[in-house]
Image: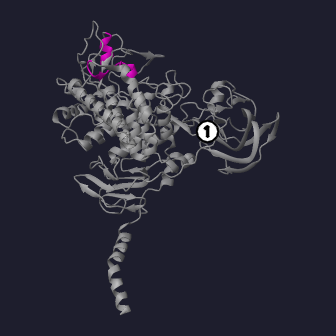
Amino acid sequence: MRNFQRFKLYVALLPGVIACFALVAYQKKEPATLPDHEQLAKHYYHEDYQWYLDNIPFFECSDKQIEEVYYYRWKLYKAHIRNTGTNKFIITEFINHVPWDRDPYCTINAASMHHIYEGRWLRNPRYVNGYVNYLCRESGNNRRYSESIADAAYANYLVNGDKQFITGQLDSLKNTYDQWMDHWDSSKHLYYIPAMPDATEYTIASIDASGGKDGFDDGEAFRPTINSYMYGNAMAISKIAALKGDKETSDEFRKRAGNLKENVQQNLWNPSLQHFTDRFKVNNEFVKYWNFIRGRELAGFAPWYFDLPDDNPTYNAAWKHLKDTSGLLGQYGFRTNEPSYEYYFKQFVYFEGKRGSQWNGPSWPYQSSQALTAMANFLNNYKQDVISNSDYLKCLRSFTKQHYLPDGKINLVENYDPNLGGPIVYYYWSNHYLHSSFNNLVITGLCGIRPSESDELNIHPLIDNSISYYCLSGLNYHGHKLTVLYDRDGTKYKLGKGLFVFVDGNDVVVKEQQGKYKIKIGEAKQQGSFKNISPNYALNIARDKFPSVSASVNSIPDSLFQAVDGRIWYFPEITNFWSTANSASLSDWFAIDFGQNRRISTIKIYPFTDSVRFALPDEIAMEYKLNGNWMTVKIKKQVPAKLSENTINTWTVEPVNASAIRINFKHRSNQIAVSEIECY
């Protein structure tokens, strides 16, 4: 009897046992054919590979030019990350200081939306979260330019799933939104702005308002840009408030967004041009209040960046202008307005004999990436037959090629000639210019990752037969590690034909319907713990008080403070280092005076080399100052063991109480340069 009962128990358990085996069999691990992250990181970033290995999603594609620019853009992004204090980070636009940025941080709020959309894909959230904190809670958004920071901050949440962080920004976002009432016309229920504060000097509105004589500023107009930004911000605030359980605020801002949407569609849609265009706020001898401007601009696609327009053939027809080579699409990129405009490409401003920045035809990465983001939204969220995946890829490839200078080097600058190709504005300060997005276009466009609050993820690759394979791996999404790969004929990754998805290393069920895919991602997981960074006692972004710096050579502030300014890059085109250039000695020193005793146990040095002027030091020795006396720092460990160029070198030392640190460099054979020195 007992054996019979045992037999019945086995029979009862059998389906569950079989199911467990089936589950294990089904959950295949990521195959060995996937890209080797370390190999890719070393290929693209050389000695500095470890930061990228720790932070970026890796991408492999049959279009090698898109792949190469993808990795350049992460190098560009890292160069624009600036440490501004303990656990504080911002993202810069110009790689070095310009007179119109926010001193001493060197930030400009205009391109912040691009910075956040791009940086949200980094594995470590401290960089973009720090930047959002700076913009919102620390008043870094000075509203010098129009912005859509609330929308971008919410987009960051859609990737990292950090509800506590985003709801903590709500009050600041609401306050900033209300400050924009100083650009609100209560009679038209629309926002207005001149050209320059919209980050687009020399637009049709501003040029025509000057009678064709100028256009840098003025030309106040009700623009599709600022009104779309404010719509996007209102929708984001409504959703963030809902996350917080604040129904009153959520309802209020959803209503604001709805009213703005209605007025944009009713009043900024230009039926004769079949496009969203400006209407004049200014009224003078040249232009009249409330008249439409007399031409199409690329800015007219801004509403789709936020999914503002209704899905109907009337508005959808605007997209035909984006693939019209006599209109907004040049041979080498998007035009900011059409050639039919009277002052198209007329040059109004010069700087040191070179053409200056204008938006009356030149191709700008800022608006190109905005239009491509809008195009990806249009292809994903609208029922239309105006544009196709092939149109998206064609425009993305055109934008990709703009990253290359005529000599073949990759260096993104301010703007380009869409008719002849090549850069227009290419000043010293505009080297490696972060005024746009690109990797977000690859991740959410080409690869089709469409973030949402849901525990389901939609994937809609914007590809055609010109893409035979791609793999996006190590992507952090809702706290999960995601790999998405596409193999047209199954020969690249040996898994079969089509799209495959792995979550946390295991393959998952992929539901497909008409080229769109859906997977169950599961609940958002808490981000892994990221250690708080200890204070860097060498950091001084304000060049004031302590720590103070001195050196045996090149002791002018512009040279000295570049070594302690929280910015690290190794681009040879633009200086960011203290150096021993023109030193007659074979040994030089750099000293950091803390102004008080600091307990130091770690010193980090970032040597810069360029194979022309600067090489690695032959030897480095360190001293600390205590009670007026210099004493030798005792080294416990050096990583890497051999000094490495263009990357971080870390010395763990016997802890010392020091009022100053002095680093001695022997350079018998070459001059040396240092991008940054940090003391912890």
Q: Residue furthest top?
A: 285
Task: Report crowding for label 1: few under 14, some 14 to 19, many 20 or more residues within 10 A (C-alpha).
Answer: many
Residue 146 image point, x, y percent: 39, 25
Q: Residue at x 42, y 28 (%)?
A: 176
Residue marked by disc 1: 609
Viewer-closest of 585 and 412: 412
Q: Is residue 651 left or right of residue 374?
A: right
Q: Is residue 347 visible?
A: yes
Mark 1: amino acid: Thr
Q: Is residue 403 visible?
A: no
Residue 461 image point, x, y percent: 30, 49
Viewer-closest of 20 and 372: 20
Q: Secondary structure at mark 1?
A: loop
Q: Is residue 404 above or below residue 451?
A: above
- Quarter in which the N terminus is drawn: bottom left
Q: Residue at x 54, y 47 (%)?
A: 51
Q: Is residue 603 above or below residue 180?
A: below
Q: Quadrant of residue 316?
A: top left
Residue 10 image point, x, y percent: 36, 83
Residue segment shown in magenta: 187-210
Residue 103 image point, x, y percent: 54, 24
Q: Is residue 288 left or right of residue 666?
A: left
